[in-house]
């Protein structure tokens, strides 16, 4: 107990003294179950090694092991579910005293990270490295960029790229549920985006090939609205039994389009494996309304495949994409994400402000 108090005392901990006796190092592959921080210089993690009982790891600065910034990164980035490879040494309880062994971490490598977005599907992403493995010269520049920019700063970022932020003016119809100017529901946001898309691309173009591809579109609200305008649309979303029209929507589709019209749903994560598929090759337009972690592959696919796209980005997911850089800085804020997406092909990209609350910047890429 006294040893435990020694390690968590913030005024004492600077570097954990190494024993003068020879320590045996072990390399362990394990899954993180829990993490507890005790200031910037001390982190405890409960882990489950492969085919063994769970143990507690101690991440702390030491003369021959981790540095202070390494521990700080672990405190900030490590999540339950991550799979890590650690080199540790074991400190046995003092002779004649009861206690459990202490496992001190000397180095760590992340093999896979746990991901859970609004898809509610938890998984690990192999061969993705956390920001803690990014070179310190790049990592430290973005450590304090944790607060998103305000509207004025967003406008300044776009202006610095020599791009104008065009405001899209949407006039709601006099009648219709969820369409008033004061309504900020998801349905109204999709209505605004639908009208914006129709203002940029003619229906004849949208219906070319297999039609519009709605990436990470959730329940398919945008697909339904485009269908009601006579536009072919396919939803790509990994969730099962979610892309189903409700009773009101089915009746509206039947009345407008007749029998036999259902929502096309491809149950897949939008990943690079789909770039060369017929699904992408035959589509007319890629669309993403707050597509979360699919924002990055959607923008990559649009540029690499020369497909027109409209994306309204939302969450940054800097942990999932530690290799995204603007200059020498990691993409950690919303403004930096906008800058990163615009820079993919700045000459053929336009930026628009949609009239609803929240993250409402639409980035349009049109290679045609």
Image: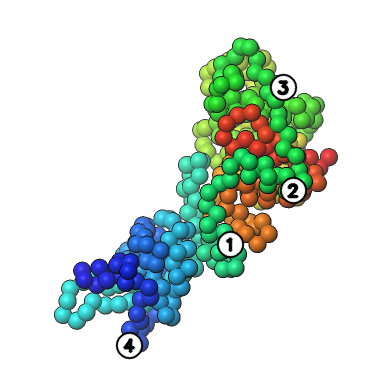
Task: Tell me which label, 3 or 1, sits earlier in the chain.
Answer: 1
- Under circle 1, the secondary element is helix
Task: Tell me which label, 2 or 1, sits earlier in the chain.
Answer: 1
State the separation of the CA atoms marked 2 and 1.
Answer: 21 Å
In the image, is 367 to the left or to the right of 150? Answer: right
Count neighbours of disc 3 (C-alpha within 10 A) and say few if under 14, some if 14 to 19, many if 20 or more: some
State the separation of the CA atoms marked 3 and 4.
Answer: 77 Å
Task: Tell me which label, 4 or 1, sits earlier in the chain.
Answer: 4
State the separation of the CA atoms marked 2 and 3.
Answer: 37 Å
Type of colouring:
rainbow
Residue 84 placed where, x, y %?
46, 65
State the separation of the CA atoms marked 3 and 1.
Answer: 49 Å
**Which residue in the protein does label 3 denote?**
230
Give the answer, above or below, for where 306 lies relative to 205: below
Asked if one can make out residue 22 in the rendered structure from this viewpoint, the answer is yes
**Mark carried by residue 21:** 4
- Under circle 4, the secondary element is loop
Residue sitting at x 23%, y 76%: 93
Question: Which quarter of the rendered picture does the N terminus lie within?
Answer: bottom left
**Which residue in the protein does label 1 denote?**
141
Count neighbours of disc 1 (C-alpha within 10 A) and say few if under 14, some if 14 to 19, many if 20 or more: few
Q: Nearer the viewer, mark 3 or mark 1?
A: 1
**Mark carried by residue 171:** none
Asked whether 50 or 301 is in front, the reply is 301
User: Do the residues under discs 4 and 1 have CB atoms within 8 angstroms?
Assistant: no
Count neighbours of disc 2 (C-alpha within 10 A) and say few if under 14, some if 14 to 19, many if 20 or more: few
- Under circle 2, the secondary element is loop
Residue sitting at x 63%, y 56%: 324
**Which residue in the protein does label 2 denote?**
161
Task: Tell me which label, 3 or 4, sits earlier in the chain.
Answer: 4
Residue 153 placed where, x, y %?
63, 44
Count neighbours of disc 4 (C-alpha within 10 A) and say few if under 14, some if 14 to 19, many if 20 or more: few
């Amino acid at each position: 107990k006294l040893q435990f108090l020694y390690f968590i005392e913030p005024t004492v901990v600077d570097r954990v003294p190494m024993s003068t006796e020879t320590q045996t190092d072990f390399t362990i592959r394990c899954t993180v179950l829990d993490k507890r921080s005790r200031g910037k210089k001390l982190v405890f993690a409960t882990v489950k090694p492969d085919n063994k009982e769970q143990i507690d790891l101690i991440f702390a600065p030491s003369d021959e092991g981790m540095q202070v910034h390494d521990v700080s990164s672990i405190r900030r980035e490590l999540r339950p579910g991550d799979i890590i490879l650690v080199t540790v040494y074991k400190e046995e309880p003092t002779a004649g005293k009861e206690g459990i062994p202490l496992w001190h971490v000397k180095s760590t490598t992340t093999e896979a990270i746990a991901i859970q977005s609004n898809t509610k599907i938890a998984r690990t992403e192999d061969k993705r490295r956390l920001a803690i493995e990014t070179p310190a010269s790049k990592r430290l520049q973005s450590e304090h960029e944790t607060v998103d920019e305000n509207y004025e700063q967003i406008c300044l970022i776009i202006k610095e790229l020599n791009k104008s932020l065009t405001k899209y003016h949407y006039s709601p119809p006099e009648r219709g549920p969820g369409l008033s100017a004061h309504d900020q529901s998801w349905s109204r946001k999709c209505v605004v985006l639908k009208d914006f898309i129709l203002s940029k691309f003619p229906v004849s173009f949208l219906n070319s090939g297999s039609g519009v591809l709605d990436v990470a579109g959730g329940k398919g609200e945008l697909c339904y609205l485009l269908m009601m305008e006579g536009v072919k649309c396919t939803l790509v979303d990994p969730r099962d039994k979610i892309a189903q029209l409700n009773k009101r929507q089915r009746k509206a589709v039947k009345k407008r389009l007749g029998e036999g019209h259902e929502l096309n749903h491809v149950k897949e994560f939008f990943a690079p494996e789909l770039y060369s598929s017929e699904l992408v090759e035959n589509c007319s337009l890629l669309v993403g309304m707050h597509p979360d972690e699919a924002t990055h592959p959607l923008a990559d696919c649009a540029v690499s495949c020369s497909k027109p796209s409209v994306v309204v980005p939302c969450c940054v997911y800097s942990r999932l994409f530690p290799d995204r850089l603007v200059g020498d800085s990691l993409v950690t804020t919303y403004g930096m994400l906008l800058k990163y997406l615009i820079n993919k092909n700045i000459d053929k990209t336009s930026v628009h402000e949609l009239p609803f609350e929240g993250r409402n910047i639409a980035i349009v890429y049109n290679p045609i």
